[in-house]
Amino acid sequence: MPTFTTDGVEIAFDDIAPSDESRGVMLLVHGFASNRKEGWRRTGWYAALERRGMRCIALDQRGHGESAKLYEPDAYGRDRLAADVIALLDHLDLRRVDLFGYSMGARTALAAAIAAPERFSNLILGGVGEKLLEPRAPSGPTDAMAQAMLADDPETISHPMLRSFRHFADEQGEDRRALAAFTRAQNPPLDVEAMNRSPVPVLVVAGQRDSGAGDPDGLASAFPEGRGVTVVGCDHFSAIPHALTKAAVFDFLDGMLDDPFADRF
């Protein structure tokens, strides 16, 4: 298992390179309570990128998988998560890659692309939509998630979404105390003005039944070169392994999606 250390934190990652890297490099950032193996290998992304001839890099975000577990919320600020992504590129001596973040990983990927747009050829935000732009309360849902992670008995968690994330964390053997600290990190609102100025082409893709994401087009419209795709019939968890999600991502990378702004000219 390759690792590197940044900001005093050990980060685990995979780096899978085909014999021919002519089709580029994709860096994958998993979602909350997941890890690189569950979020990307089991869902078929490693294999799909290998078939495409792309180098595949995926990290375990701090507090997840085989990366270091930290128990103070300050350790999980979005700026630190984004810095881990950029530090991995530096560690691997990669100047520019395609970046794909799913769910919570989409927030990390977006922050990295805003901080260092010159490092990313394309940005793919999965499992999110227009609700990402809605203000988040400083407490409430995030603290409820922390409490769900720390509950002695998951069956006492009344909210279905919170209970599903708790079961998912248990299934993956994740450190629930670290996850609770992760959810309690305080972050500023997303920088919508920076999104409006972003030079990076962006694909936003989410399942039709992903009620927590909202309309992908609503988020895509915040970027100068944004494109939204809805995966019919899928929810938050079923969209990521779906063949239609992979098709949308690869069509986007190949420039085969219709230009969403063609009617402006």
Image (cartoon, helix red, strand yellow):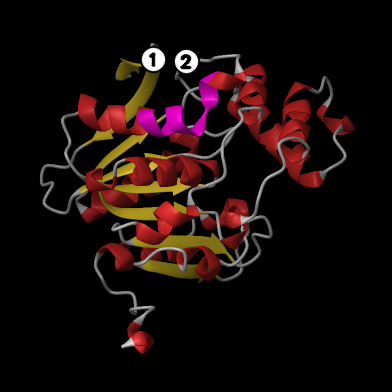
Secondary-structure class at tag 2:
loop
Kindly indicate the quadrant of the structure image that contains residue 80.
top left
Residue identified by numbered label 2: 68
Q: Are marks 1 and 2 in contact (CB under 8 Å)?
A: yes
- How far across and how far down the image is residue 244, in percent? 45, 66
Q: Residue at x 35, y 40 (%)?
A: 115
Q: Residue at x 36, y 86 (%)?
A: 264
**Is residue 19 toward the left or the right of residue 240 in the image?**
left
Q: Nearer the viewer, residue 90 or 64?
A: 90
Three-letter code, disc 1: Glu
Crowd class of label 1 (few under 14; some 14 to 19; many from 20; radius 10 Å): some
Residue identified by numbered label 1: 10
Quadrant for the C terminus in the image: bottom left
Three-letter code, disc 2: Ala
Numbered range of the magenta stretch: 75-83
| 59 vs 126: above or below | above
Crowd class of label 2 (few under 14; some 14 to 19; many from 20; radius 10 Å): some
Q: Is residue 63 visible?
A: no
Of mark 1 and mark 2, the one earlier in the sequence is 1
Q: Is residue 78 magenta?
A: yes
Secondary-structure class at tag 1:
strand
